[in-house]
Image (cartoon, helix red, strand yellow):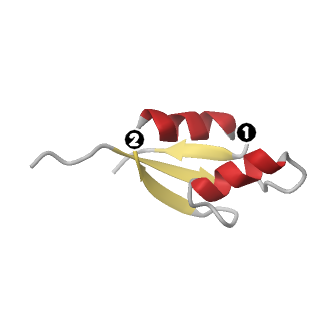
């Protein structure tokens, strides 16, 4: 069985003061607090969400 590609995303800046849709995108990615890291499936939809909040998150080396 082939394993799915994953991507690790860390929130490095607060969503406070940014547009509501950007804060909602952080929540959609599973990010709730600063420096939290989530591992997500690497799909075009997730890539698009990361792109939308690229000023608030960092993509870390995959596992």
Q: Nearer the viewer, mark 2 or mark 1?
A: 2
With respect to residue 42, does 33 lie above or below?
below
At which x and y percent is residue 20?
A: 81, 50
* Residue 42 tag number: 2
**Badge 2 density bin: few <14, some 14–19, many ≥20, Cα 10 Å:** few
Q: Which quarter of the figure has residue 49?
A: top right
* Residue 13 tag number: none
Q: How many marks?
A: 2
- Numbered disc 2: secondary structure: loop
- Numbered disc 1: secondary structure: loop
Is label 2 in contact with label 1 (beta carbons under 8 Å)? no
Toward the right, the furthest residue is 17
- Looking at the image, can residue 12 be seen? no
Residue in the picture at 66% in, 66% down: 32
At which x and y percent is residue 9?
A: 53, 50
User: Gap between marks 2 and 1, in whole Å?
Assistant: 19 Å
* Residue 55 tag number: 1
């Amino acid at each position: 069985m082939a394993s799915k590609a994953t991507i690790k995303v860390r929130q490095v800046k607060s969503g406070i003061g940014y547009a509501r849709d950007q804060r909602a995108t952080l929540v959609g990615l599973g990010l709730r607090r600063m420096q939290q890291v989530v591992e997500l499936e690497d799909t075009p939809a997730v890539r698009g969400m990361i792109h939308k909040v690229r000023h608030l998150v960092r993509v870390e080396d995959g596992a």
